[in-house]
Image (spheres, rainbow, N blue to C red):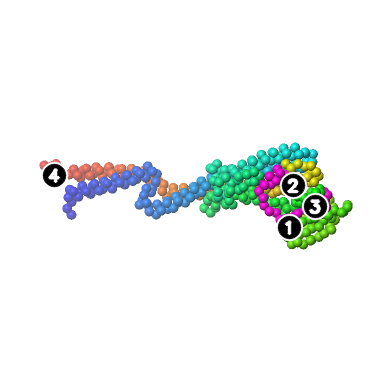
Amino acid sequence: MRITTNMMYDMGVARLADQQSGLNKTQQQVATGRRILTPADDPAGAASVLQVSQADGLTMQHAENRNLARNSLGIEDGVLHSFSDLMQAIKTTVIGAGNGTLGNVERGFMASELRGQLDQLIGLANSTDGNGNYLFSGFQSHTVPFARSGSTVSYTGDTGLRALQVSGERQMAVGDSGQALFLSVPEGNGRFVAEAAAGNTGTGKIGAGSLTDPALFTGQDYQIDFTVAGATTTYSITNITTGTVISSGNSYTDGSAITVDGMQIDIKGSPANGDQFMVSPSGRKSVFEVVNELITALSTPVVTSSDSTKLSNSLTMAGSELSNAFDKLLETRASVGARLKELDALEDTGSYMHLQHQTRLSELQDLDYNEALSKLAMQQISLEAAQKSFIQVTGLSLFKYL
């Protein structure tokens, strides 16, 4: 085949361009530290890099979500701790208010202190996570959950629980609904409410009562009616729900327990003729309502022995319901603590997964510098040799010898 001058030039230039391109590619690999610069360099490897990078991206997003969750739950735990301290202070006030030596003025001071503590409770219930999201408003994170109007505290949030994806398989609540936490305090002892009728005139004081046999508990309404004839005091028990008189003419002994359908009711003192005590299933009320009722009881002047008895019954009820609210707070704090502990465990797992992803990415795309630098040196030598030979070949001409 005849080799023309143009063919020699074209072949030489193409060869030089190929070597220059290879040298440039190796230089880019050395500069970036990456073996794969484009998918064409290693299609299978590039696909694996993309897959591992996406998985690592999710891992890092979960890590960011865990940080957000840890921050929100940490703030909530602090708020609940402060709330618990206030509730404990209010319970101490209830105990102190039962001191028979206190007068109306002293109890009035206690009521004033409770009003201030109630404001603090509402303020804590309206706490945010630092990013403007209210902790206890459910899904309505930008809505102030609790508003006070006189003695009424209303809730404008919902029962939802905001959650973050903190791992591939785990969504975690980063707050708690104020509906469940603050507005669902069980009345009475948590199973039933034992209380004196408002019109009682005797000195009969009723305790919170207890459930002695859950199998016999009906969850129905009962009424205990007292009859006083001379020195004899008797009582009857009626199931109000069914209209059935369970027993009558029972002899009353001060401090002796009264039992009915698995419930034990403790009444002390001297009930007057016609005094009544009611027993009904526990409902739900807000912790703010409990405190407001306590404020009302302490603000009401005590003049007669009957007034003193009503105050004692109110304090007993308040003490039981504050204990129920306190138990709910402790339960929620335990839940928050468990979630924080789980985040720590998930963080360890997430860190390990991130390390594995980075190791795999390094295996797939990181450059072997020893091999690359050796290849670069050889490509430089080859290019220089090709350039010199191209000059020699293109310089051949018979005219030089004429």
The reply to whether callout 1 and callout 3 are in contact (CB within 8 Å) is no
Kindly identify which numbered label has been placed on residue 221.
Answer: 1
* Residue 399 highlighted magenta (yes or no): no
Classify residue 81 as left or right of residue 208.
left
Residue type at mark 2? Ser
Marks 2 and 3, the one that precedes in the sequence: 3
Residue type at mark 3? Asp
Name the residue rendered at 59%, 52% in the picture.
Answer: 159
The foreground one among 152 and 362 is 152
For the residues carrying marks 3 and 4, which lies nearer the camera in this image?
A: 3
Name the residue rendered at 64%, 49% in the picture.
Answer: 183
- Which region of the structure is painted magenta? 268-297
Marks 1 and 3, the one that precedes in the sequence: 1
Marks 2 and 4, the one that precedes in the sequence: 2
Reading the image, the residue beneath label 4 is: 398
Reading the image, the residue beneath label 3 is: 275
Residue type at mark 4? Leu
Q: Secondary structure at mark 1?
A: loop
The reply to whether callout 4 and callout 1 are in contact (CB within 8 Å) is no
